[in-house]
Image (tube, rainbow, N blue to C red):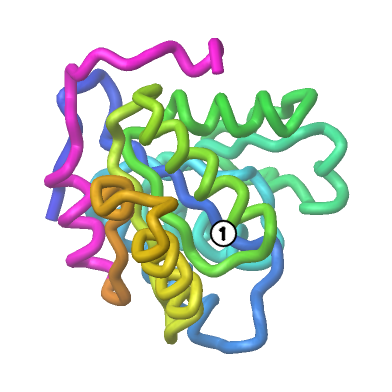
Amino acid sequence: MSTTSVSDHPFSLCVYCGSRAGDRPAYAEQARRLGTAIGRRGWRLVYGGGRAGLMGEVADAALAAGASVIGVIPDSLMRLEVGHAGLSELHVVHSMHERKQMMAERADAFIALPGGIGTFEELFEVWTWRHLGYHQRPIGLLDVEGYYGTLVAFLRQGVDAGFMSEAQMAMLAVGDDIEPLLDALYALRSPGVAERPLDRI
């Protein structure tokens, strides 16, 4: 399948994921499958610029499948996360705020693989931005082997307790199968929709 956005670049998917590989082979396997799917669809990968853990797995697989890959990494993390030297573009920025803004500005949609507190923070921030109207881009959660099952249950508890709405919950597409989830994110895109400048957040 090959699909592109109506903009002047291929459809760009921003992937949030761990700089560690995790303790199950399935995590890295699914990261590689996601990277391969991005390349096969003719899409572009935007991610955090590292070559360690799941970050490196998804980037290497996307590159091998012919995708353009853009990495964004703060200078303070170049050693810690080991910046990937083989990307189409690697942007070294001064802060995490710049990193997340640049990644978001270059994305048409977002998806989170398994990861730790950095991945959680990125997911919830871009979800909050969507709720506040700063963007209308689709957001997905790839639930590999039930990794996010308890989180999704907790989020449902937030709805049941009256702190979240069904509309907010509906902004997050959750799935455990890569291809249908990517199809859903592409179908949910909103090309040409006016958005608030992300640099004013």
* Residue 35 shows up from this direction: no
Tell me the quadrant of the picture where the C terminus can be found: top right
Name the residue located 56 percent from the left edge and 59 percent from the top edge. 17
Q: Give the answer, above or below, for where 64 lies relative to 154.
A: above
Crowding near pointer 1: few (<14 within 10 Å), some, many (20+)?
many
Location of residue 14 in the rendering, given as x and y in whole percent from the top left corner: 44, 43
Q: Is 182 displayed left or right of 160 in the figure?
A: left
Q: Is 66 displayed left or right of 74 in the figure?
A: left
Name the residue located 43 percent from the left edge and 84 percent from the top edge. 146
Q: Give the answer, above or below, for where 3 lies relative to 169.
A: above
Between 28 and 88, the one lying in front of the other is 28
Q: Is 174 displayed left or right of 47 in the figure?
A: left
Callout 1 amino acid: Cys
Q: Give the answer, above or below, for where 122 lies relative to 192.
A: below
Please identify the quarter of the rendering in which residue 181 is found: bottom left
- The residue indicated by pointer 1 is 17
Location of residue 35 in the rendering, given as x and y in whole percent from the top left corner: 41, 60
Name the residue located 38 percent from the left edge and 55 percent from the top edge. 162
Name the residue located 61 percent from the left edge and 60 percent from the top edge. 56
Tell me the quadrant of the picture where the N terminus can be found: bottom left
Location of residue 140 in the rendering, given as x and y in whole percent from the top left corner: 34, 55
Between 182 and 71, the one lying in front of the other is 182
What are the residue bounds of the magenta stretch? 178-201
